[in-house]
Image: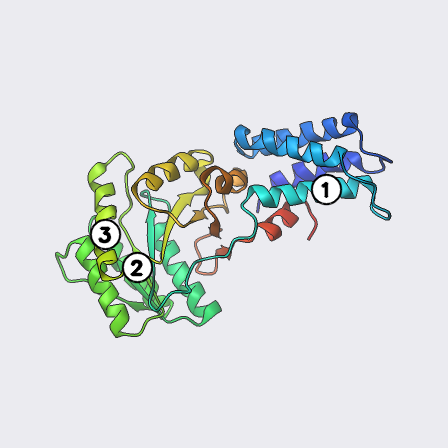
Amino acid sequence: MFESLSNRLTTALSGLTGKATLSDDNISATLREVRLALLEADVALEVVLPFLERVRERALGMPVTPGLAPSQAFVRIVHDELIEVMGGQSEGLALNAQPPAVILMAGLQGVGKTTTAAKIGGWLARQQQKKVMLASTDVYRPAAMEQLARLAETLSIDYFEADEGAKPSNIAKSALQAAKTNFADVLIIDTAGRLHNKNDLMNELSKIIRVIKKIDENYPTEIVLVLDGNIGQNSVKQAEVFKEICNIDSIIITKLDGTAKGGVLIPIAQLLNLPISFIGTGEQKEDLINFRAKEYTEALLDLS
C-alpha cells in the first residue's frame, strides 16, 4: 500500500546519505524531491509548502548529535513533521460513553459506507469484545437494508430490523431503544448515501441527529464521515460540506487498495482538523486498519 509514495520519499531522502553536514544547498535539493513526491501523491500544495519550510528550519537549526548521521537526523525531522501534519496520534473512536455508544455513519453515495459500518462492527467485536448492533436508515437504495443484515449475520452481529415504511429518523430512534434493551455496547447506524447538493437528504441527516439527541444530548457518541480515497483532494471538499451540516468527529478513508492518491491521508487531518480513525484497504471484513499516524509514517519512510 502506498508503495509509489514510499519509494519516492525514500529515494529523495537517500540523497543526503554520506553528507558530513546539512547545508542549505543539499537540503534544498532533497526538499525539491520530497515536494514532487508529495504533490504527485495528491498532497495539497497548501499543506506541502509550510511542511517543507518547517523541515528546513528544524534541519538548519539542529545541533550536532553524536552517533547520529546528518542524513538520519534529517529523516527523523521529516518523520516527526509528517506525524504532526496528520494530527499526531489518533485516539480512535470515542466509545468511553455509557453504553450503548452510538456511532453514526455519514458519507456520499458509493463510498463504501455500508460495508465499512459492518467492518467496524466486526472489528469492535473481535478486537475489543464489544456487543455490537447494526442498524440501517437507508430507505432509498434498493436492498441496502438487506445488505447490512447479511453482513451482520456473516459477522455474527445483532441487526435491528426496521418496520416497513418507517422513516429514517424513527428507525434510528427505535434502533437506539432496541440497543438499550439488548444491552449492546455499541450501536452503529448506517445512513443513506448523501448527495452534497441535495438539501433534502442533508436535512434528513440533521433530523436523525436531532431525534437521537432528544433521547440523550450526548448522542451520537461519534459521527464518522466515510470518504473515498480514490478522489484525492476532492475528499476534503466533500468533508467541508458535511461539517456545515453536523459535527464530524472522525474520518474513515476507504478504497486505498487501488489508488495512487494515498497522499490524501497526509493533509486531510490538518486541513479539516479531524482525526483519521480507520482506513479501508479492500472488500474483505478484515480489510480495515485502525489508523496510526506513526506506523503509517514509518512505513512511508521505510523505518519499520
Amino acid type for the residue under numbered disc 2: Leu
Counting residues from the N terminus, which is met first, the one under dot 2 or under dot 1? 1
Vertical placement of residue 64 versus 37, above or below:
below
Q: CA distance from mark 3 to mark 1?
A: 48 Å
Residue that mark 3 sits on? 210
Which residue is tagged 1?
75
For marks 3 and 1 on the same chain, the one whose residue lies earlier in the sequence:
1
Q: Tell me: 271 left or right of 150.
A: right
> Mark 3: which amino acid?
Arg
In the rendered view, tell whether residue 62 sits above or below residue 31: below
Is label 3 or label 1 in front? 3
Instruction: Examine the image and state in which quarter residue 183 appears.
Output: bottom left
Q: Circle 2 — which element? A: helix
CB atoms at circles 2 and 1 under 8 Å apart?
Answer: no
Q: Residues within 10 Å of mark 2 (few under 14, many from 20)?
A: many
Query: Residue 148 got which mark?
Result: 2
Q: State the count of labels.
A: 3
Kind of residue at badge 1: Val
Q: Nearer the viewer, residue 148 or 13?
A: 13
Tell me if I can see residue 191 in this picture.
yes
